[in-house]
Image (tube, rainbow, N blue to C red):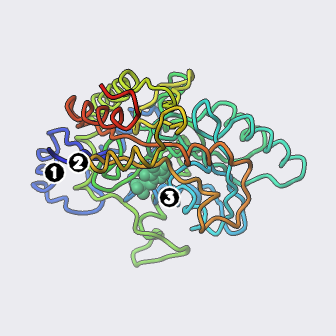
Amino acid sequence: MARIYLSAPDLAGTELAMVTDAIQSNWIAPLGPHVDAFEAEMCARLDVPYACALSSGTAALHLALLALGVGAGDHVWVSTLTFAATANAIAYVGAIPVFVDSDRASWNMDPQLFVTALEEAARTDTLPRAVIAVDLYGQCADLAPIADACHRHGVALIEDAAEALGATYRGRPAGSFGDLAILSFNGNKIITTSGGGMLVGRDKAHIERARYLATQARDPARHYEHSVIGYNYRLSNLLAAVGRAQLADLSRRVDARRTTNAYYREHLALPGWEFMPEASFGRTTAWLTCATIDPQRFGAGRDAVIDALAAADIEARPVWKPMHLQPVFRAHRSIGGAVAEDLFVRGICLPSGSSLTAADRARVVEVVRSVAPGSAR
Ligand SMILES: *Cc1c(COP(=O)(O)O)cnc(C)c1O
């Protein structure tokens, strides 16, 4: 039996034709018609006017901060329960991350905790320069109260929708909130270009600034003229061709992940096993299906379940380790943190890729049930 991965790349079937077109047209270069078309198609999907295709989601986060003018010594508030790339980008620009705890309703940035802390920061003149709200595991954060509070206090908002392409929040697409939003097309994400990302937004100046910085910051001149430090962050035309094929297949991919999620919910309705909730305000991509395990009631702990799955050649992982617990960020302030810590200690991510078969899902369920005494079929 083949190994079951957490989130394996999944081909749409049309990639080769698109890449062949890119090669035959001789656009083996960064930039080109597929890059332009990929950006335009993403804008149409997300209902945002501007986009810049980039070499990674991490590059998009870095440029989002630069485009918003975030720099050395500025404070940036960020969800603590996320992948390290979100917080690393803050360090790239010399800014100081401040971590915000999750709530149990969505596992995302706790909106009440956030708004209360921001009001307090406004009173004490310690407002952050920007906020990065993450849409965790494909589910949007409760973005309305977060965006309202940011707007009230003139704080820029970046939506990290790396895991949430295809999700919605109150009927609107993930990636269409905040001053800027970022997407990732890494190999394990909803769609992939093998590696890639995109910065999207409503302000033309932000996206133009990002495009300029991503292209070595070349000033208009016959010779090479540079007035600021630039980067080489653009997506190649070849990879954009792959991205277009994948984007056209987005709905099927989200549906496949949601089907897997529904299957797990039905077949793992076990005492002490609790799935990440789907909040009423949106529709998740179910990028990864996650759950927490109460070892007493389930009869085994999270690590025992991961070990049993590993022994059956099935990849499973703990939930992200919160940033405020990471050695590299330990010195930084955290607003709360106990909820994210608990989700990390007891949380598990199950195989969730859009190419997972019914037999794969059944195998995962069988192994999980075999660990819990009394719940094996
Ligand atoms: C994957 C991911 C990123 C980084 O994207 P890359 O394309 O891998 O650089 C950023 N934030 C979150 C939440 C992610 O899951």
Tell me: residue 205, above or below residue 377.
below
- Which sits in the foreground, 114 or 246? 114
Label disc, if present, on residue 242 of the rendered structure: 2
Query: The N terminus appears in which quarter of the rendering?
Result: top left
Asked whether mark 3 lies closer than 8 Å to ligand 1, one says: yes
Tell me: residue 316, above or below residue 260.
below
Q: Residue at x 50, y 43 (%)?
A: 347
Give the mark nearest the N terminus, 2 or 3: 3
Q: Residue at x 33, y 41 (%)?
A: 351
Give the mark nearest the N terminus, 3 or 1: 1
Task: Find disc 3 in the rendering and name its residue.
Answer: 85
Task: Find disc 1 in the rendering and name its residue.
Answer: 19
Label disc, if present, on residue 209 of the rendered structure: none
Amino acid at pointer 1: Val
- Which sits in the foreground, 24 or 288? 288
Secondary element type, mark 1: helix
Q: Position of residue 20 (x, y in %)?
A: 11, 51
Amino acid at pointer 2: Val
Q: Pointers 2 and 1 in contact (CB under 8 A)?
A: yes
Q: Pointers 2 and 3 in contact (CB under 8 A)?
A: no
